[in-house]
Structure formats: structure tokens, C-alpha cells
Amino acid sequence: MVVGIEDSLNKVLKDLECPVIVEGRSDAEVLKKYGVQNIVSLDGRPLYMVAKETAEYCRKALVLTDFDAEGEKIAGKLNVFLDKFNVVPKNSLRGKIKRIVTKEGISQIENIPIPS
């Protein structure tokens, strides 16, 4: 089915040293399979609070919400809040991951294939 997406994502996510902010638990479960340790799930919490909590222990974060319209909207708002707390969103890394998965027709993080 999707040949190479797992390898590409493994390379991008390998040695990631900042927290990854995702929309929900199913997104977090997929990223755990790629070895990502520091995952923050929004789980319906206010974006402002998530940004504030993230700022308490780091200066960079990867916002990895879905790549559909709603996920992009959430990412934009979250980036504004992170910036207010002096946390740099790793948007270039988000863009790289977006190119990898959307090329395969995937727009939701939970639908990314699990590495074998």
C-alpha cells in the first residue's frame, strides 16, 4: 500500500527532542509506535492552557494536528499561543511531515501507517 512512508517518517521523527502536540489519544498512539516519547494530547483542553503548560518545560514544540481544515486551524491558533509563551513551533518539521503523509492521501495523524 504505502511504500516508504514509514521509513521517511522514522527519519524525520528520529531523535526528536521537543514535545509533539497532537489532537487526541489515537494520534498519540501512532506516534508512540514511531518512538516519540514526549507527546502532549489536546484532548479537548483549551489551547491556551496547553501552550502555557508546554512553556513550563520547553522552548520548542512540534504542533502535529491533522492536515485537514480543522487541524490547520487548530495549529494556527496553537502557534499564536505558543509564541505568546516564547515557545517556538517547529513549523518546518510540521511541513516536512505534512508533505510525506499528504502525498499518500493521508490527512489525519491517526491514519498514518504503523511502522513494521
Image (tube, rainbow, N blue to C red):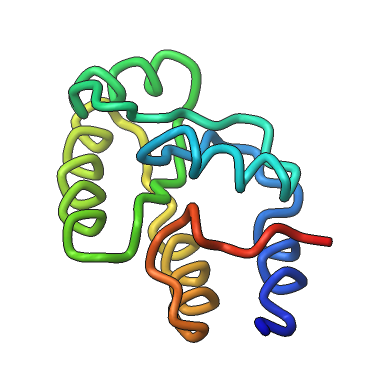
- Corner quadrant of residue 78: top left
* 107 lies left or right of 10: left
Residue 2 horizontal/vertical position (percent): 66, 82
Residue 79 horizontal/vertical position (percent): 24, 44
- Is residue 113 depicted above or below 80 in this figure? below
- Corner quadrant of residue 35: top right
Q: Nearer the viewer, residue 115 or 54?
A: 115
* 63 lies left or right of 49: right
- Is residue 94 depicted above or below 101 in this figure? above
- Is residue 49 depicted above or below 72 in this figure? above
Q: Nearer the viewer, residue 99 or 18?
A: 99
Q: Residue at x 46, y 46 (%)?
A: 62
Residue 93 horizontal/vertical position (percent): 50, 62
Residue 22 horizontal/vertical position (percent): 42, 41
Q: Residue at x 72, y 50 (%)?
A: 34
* 80 lies left or right of 13: left
Q: Nearer the viewer, residue 83 or 108?
A: 108
Q: Residue at x 41, y 13 (%)?
A: 56
- Is residue 43 depicted above or below 66 in this figure? above
In the rendered image, the quadrant that contains the C terminus is: bottom right
Number of numbered markers:
0
* 96 lies left or right of 8: left
Q: Nearer the viewer, residue 56 or 12?
A: 12
In the rendered image, the quadrant that contains the N terminus is: bottom right
Residue furthest out toward the right: 116
